[in-house]
Image (spheres, rainbow, N blue to C red):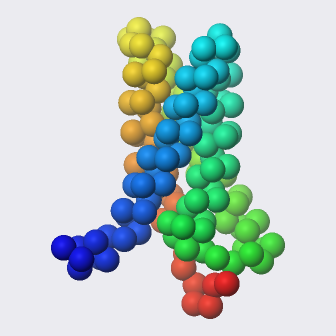
Amino acid sequence: MRELINKNKELIKYLIFGILTTLVNILCFYILDKLNIDIYINNTISWIVSVIFAFITNKLYVFESKSLDIKTIFKEGTSFLGARIFSYFVDMGTIYLLFDGLRINKLISKIVSNIIVIIINYIFSKFIFKKKEGNI
């Protein structure tokens, strides 16, 4: 069992922090919904908050990219943001399809969308945060 965990350590950490990022996103979405913020403005604000959280946790804890070199942070940050912008449009499109198109509950639409986005984001993040020997 320990060998299986060690072999899949990165994926397990990604799932843990992915769940936490999703909770941040959904909690923010829920709070803004209670304040009667438009669903698309709400989703955008929730996305921004969760992307900041995800960048920090993915960089430091999941992919263990410890470099604090400005050039590395800028490169990782711009790549991360580019990938997240792509998944943002997938998120918005999914919500539009489910909520406006199929008339599914807002929160259910958001949860389904997040499942799709988690998978996309893992694939992109794996290539953005590359472990390097000697990362500090």
List x then y, in percent, for residue 72.
72, 74
Determine the residue located farthest toward the left in the rendered image: 1
Query: What residue lies at 36% left-to-right and 62% top-to-bottom?
Result: 12
Question: Image height check: is 133 above or below 124?
Answer: below
Q: How many marks?
A: 0
List x then y, in percent, for residue 84.
59, 47
Whether residue 127 is visible to the viewer of this picture, yes or no, is: no
List x then y, in percent, for residue 61.
54, 67
Question: Image height check: is 34 above or below 118?
Answer: above
Query: What residue lies at 24% left-to-right and 77% top-to-bottom?
Result: 2
Q: Relative to 74, is 126 on the left or the right?
A: left
Question: Image height check: is 52 above or below 48?
Answer: below
Between residue 42 and residue 34, name the one nearer to us: 34
The N terminus - image quarter: bottom left
Determine the residue located farthest toward the bottom in the rendered image: 134
Query: What residue lies at 41% left-to-right and 18% top-to-bottom?
Result: 98
Between residue 44 and residue 100, name the one nearer to us: 44
Q: Quadrant of residue 30?
A: top right
Query: What residue lies at 40% left-to-right and 49% top-to-bottom?
Result: 119
The C terminus - image quarter: bottom right
Determine the residue located farthest toward the right in the rendered image: 70
Whether residue 29 is visible to the viewer of this picture, yes or no, is: yes
List x then y, in percent, for residue 35.
66, 14
Question: Image height check: is 108 above or below 116?
Answer: above
